[in-house]
Image (cartoon, rainbow, N blue to C red):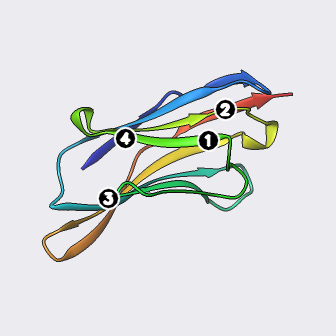
Amino acid sequence: VQLQASGGGLVQAGGSLRLSCAASGSVDSINAVRWYRQAPGNQRELVATITHEGRKIYGDSVKGRFAISGDNAKNTVYLQVNSLKPEDTAVYYCNVRGYQGDTLHDYWGQGTQVTVSS
């Protein structure tokens, strides 16, 4: 599975972006798709999860502002990021966790930069 993340950019505080994670290839079954972010000097932070049942889980710092969704026909997962704050500045990565046979794999996209100016 290859993941291509896009949609990042420079935006003013209060603005919005829609990040996309397009997948090519296939796995036998998907456990979940996640968005993480990492700011310079910080550990990677889990931002949002969508499980194969469609359950959505958000990190405390983004609840009510970010929304994860998926389009199965396009093999794409989105992260709508609203009411952006300077502290949201980071590289955002998408991750797919899925099974190939009996083996659980983690696949990562290359990241997309989100920069929020005050």
Amino acid marked by disc 2: Asn
Amino acid marked by disc 1: Phe
Callout 2: few (<14), some (14-19), or many (20+) C-alpha neighbours within 10 Å? Answer: some
Amino acid marked by disc 4: Gly
| Comes first in the chain, label 1 or label 3 | 3
Tell me how far mark 3 sits from mark 4, CA to CA.
10 Å
Q: What count of labels does the image hold?
A: 4
Q: Find numbered disc 2 in the image and state the secondary structure of the residue it sits on.
A: loop
Tell me how far mark 3 sits from mark 2, CA to CA.
24 Å
Q: Find numbered disc 1 in the image and state the secondary structure of the residue it sits on.
A: strand
Residue 74 position within the rendered picture, expressed as x and y whole percent measured from the top left: 26, 32
Give the residue displayed 68% in from the left and 48% down from the top: 62
Can residue 8 be seen at all in this image of the molecule?
no
Residue that numbered label 4 is attached to:
70
Kindly indicate the quadrant of the structure image that contains residue 118: top right
Horizontal relation, residue 43 to residue 14: left or right: left
Q: Are marks 3 and 2 in contact (CB under 8 Å)?
A: no
Q: Are marks 1 and 3 in contact (CB under 8 Å)?
A: no
Give the residue displayed 67% in from the left and 50% down from the top: 63
Kindly indicate the quadrant of the structure image that contains residue 99: bottom left
Relative to 31, does residue 8 appear above or below in the rendering?
A: above
Q: Which mark is residue 66?
A: 1
| Comes first in the chain, label 4 or label 2 | 4
Residue that numbered label 3 is attached to:
52
| Comes first in the chain, label 2 or label 1 | 1
Amino acid marked by disc 3: His
Q: Which mark is residue 82?
A: 2
